[in-house]
Amino acid sequence: MSAEELSADFKQAMRRLAASVHIVATRSEGRRFGMTATAVTSLSMAPPSVLVCVNQRAATHPALARHGQIFSVNLLAPGHQDVANRFGTPAEDGDARFNVGGWDETEEGVPILAGAASSLLCAVEGLYPHATHTIVVGRVLRVALGEARCALLYGDGRYSGLS
């Protein structure tokens, strides 16, 4: 199997892997940055921490990839497809992305999605570059639980909800 065939098959296999949809957001140099992410997972309970995989070409990457940077991880609920699409569109950048969905700010000035199933406020504790992405380890500082008990999922090119 050639490298191109392996890459194409791998991409198709990963499309079949359903994952919860998140918006990762931060503020840097007075500007808001955010991106849609499915490569988010819990890492540790003690201390509470998560990991987020960020493409190094993403506009959010330089704003996020600094030790100590504060960011939010917002778990989307069904009905947030428009938010996921806006933050997943490369042509939309910066503050324009935040025109969809209701956004509040933490006392640190970090954007947090009102109505998210849950939101985590995190501080970058580790950065691990690998190929095209950086694995960002975030230590959880605070948790906000929303009313929604379902997560928006994305798999095989479409959204669905799961309680």
Image: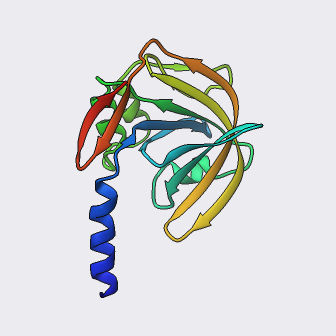
Residue 101 vertical position relative to residue 152 in the rendered view, above or below: above
Q: Residue furthest top?
A: 147
> What's the image's color scheme?
rainbow
Q: Position of residue 123 (x, y in %)?
A: 70, 39
Q: Quadrant of the C terminus?
A: top left
Residue at position x 43%, y 34% in the image: 95
Q: Nearer the viewer, residue 74 or 35?
A: 74
Residue 4 vertical position relative to residue 117 in the rendered view, above or below: below
Q: Position of residue 122 (x, y in %)?
A: 66, 35
Q: Quadrant of residue 160?
A: top left
Q: Is residue 143 left or right of residue 91?
A: right
Q: Residue furthest right?
A: 46
Q: Quadrant of the N terminus?
A: bottom left
Q: Is residue 43 left or right of residue 21?
A: right
Q: Position of residue 94 (x, y in %)?
A: 44, 39
How many numbered marks have been drawn onto this rendered protein structure?
0
Residue at position x 54%, y 44% in the image: 41
Asked whether residue 32 is in view, the answer is: no
Residue at position x 26%, y 63% in the image: 12
Q: Nearer the viewer, residue 134 or 143?
A: 143
Asked whether residue 132 is in view, the answer is: yes
Q: Position of residue 100 (x, y in %)?
A: 33, 26
Q: Residue furthest front?
A: 163
Q: Nearer the viewer, residue 113 or 10?
A: 10
Residue 100 vertical position relative to residue 12 in the rendered view, above or below: above
Residue at position x 62%, y 40% in the image: 29
